[in-house]
Image: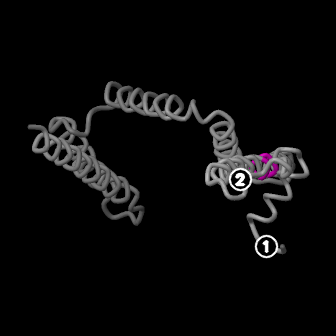
């Protein structure tokens, strides 16, 4: 029985009283489907138990006073993700709601950024940014700092990523239009 998944799950279900083998119908396919659904639920329960243990372990690590700030934040993010996974496995019907809420939060942050800082899709905003980069590069001439170049490169990459994302979205809309009669 060593590592036989089915055998282990049968024993676990039998010892917990979930399956009564005196009423088993071994030649009936519906009984085997019933057994498979029980196995799936037992495995989900095991996964939740493992996630709980992982979450408790992460909490124990977080309570350590010897963590650096970066390690603390990394562990905290991991614990948050584990907690979300555990919550979703306990309440799978909320998965879509959680994803929708996360998307709404992201959209509102993007909107705040656009309102407070500017919209990368706006040519006027892009011109302002590039003018500022040029001004800062002039101030930086002769020094070995290079920070402005890093910022400018990061901005250019972000702009390219935004353009690529918009192109993909447009392509998806075009494909969808072609499929609709």
Quadrant in which residue 3 is drawn: bottom right
Total tally of numbered discs in the picture:
2
Q: Which residue is mark 2?
A: 39
**Vertical position of residue 178 compared to residue 8: above or below:** above
Percent position (x, y) of residue 167? 19, 48
Percent position (x, y) of residue 71? 71, 54
Which is more N-terminal, label 2 or label 1? Answer: 1
Residue 85 is inside the magenta segment = no
Quadrant in which residue 110 is drawn: top left
Residue 52 is inside the magenta segment = yes
Q: Which residues are magenta?
A: 49-53
Instruction: For label 1, count other residues whose C-alpha is less than 10 Å away and answer few (under 14), some (14-19) or many (20+).
Output: few
* Helix, strand or loop at mark 1: loop
Q: Which residue is most to the bottom?
A: 2
> Does the magenta stretch mainly form a helix, a strand or a loop?
helix
Quadrant for the C terminus in the image: top left
Percent position (x, y) of residue 134? 23, 51
Percent position (x, y) of residue 53? 82, 50
In the depicted view, which residue is nearer to us: 142 or 173? 173
Marks 1 and 2 close (CB-CB < 8 Å)? no
Rendered image coloring scheme: one colour
Q: Which residue is mark 1?
A: 3
* Left or right of residue 20: residue 141: left
* Left or right of residue 156: residue 116: right
* Left or right of residue 98: residue 34: right
In the depicted view, which residue is nearer to us: 101 or 153? 101
Instruction: For label 2, count other residues whose C-alpha is less than 10 Å away and answer few (under 14), some (14-19) or many (20+).
Output: some
In the depicted view, which residue is nearer to us: 4 or 21? 21
- Residue drawn at x 23%, y 44% as measured from the top left: 169
| Of the two numbered discs 1 and 2 in the rendering, the one whose residue sits closer to the viewer | 2
Quadrant for the N terminus in the image: bottom right
């Amino acid at each position: 029985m060593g590592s036989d998944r089915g055998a282990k799950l049968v024993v676990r279900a039998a010892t917990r009283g979930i399956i009564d083998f005196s009423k088993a119908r071994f030649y009936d396919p519906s009984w085997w489907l019933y057994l498979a659904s029980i196995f799936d639920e037992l495995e989900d329960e095991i996964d939740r138990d493992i996630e709980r243990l992982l979450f408790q372990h992460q909490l124990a690590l977080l309570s350590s006073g010897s963590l650096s700030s970066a390690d603390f934040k990394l562990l905290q993010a991991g614990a948050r993700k584990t907690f979300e996974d555990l919550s979703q496995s306990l309440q799978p019907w909320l998965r879509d709601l959680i994803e929708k809420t996360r998307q709404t939060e992201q959209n509102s942050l993007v909107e705040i950024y656009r309102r407070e800082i500017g919209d990368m899709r706006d040519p006027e905003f892009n011109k302002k940014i590039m003018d500022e980069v040029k001004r800062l590069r002039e101030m930086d001439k002769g020094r070995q700092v290079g920070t402005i170049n890093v910022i400018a490169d990061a901005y250019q990459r972000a702009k390219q990523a935004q353009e690529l994302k918009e192109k993909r979205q447009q392509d998806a809309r075009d494909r969808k239009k072609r499929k609709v009669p």
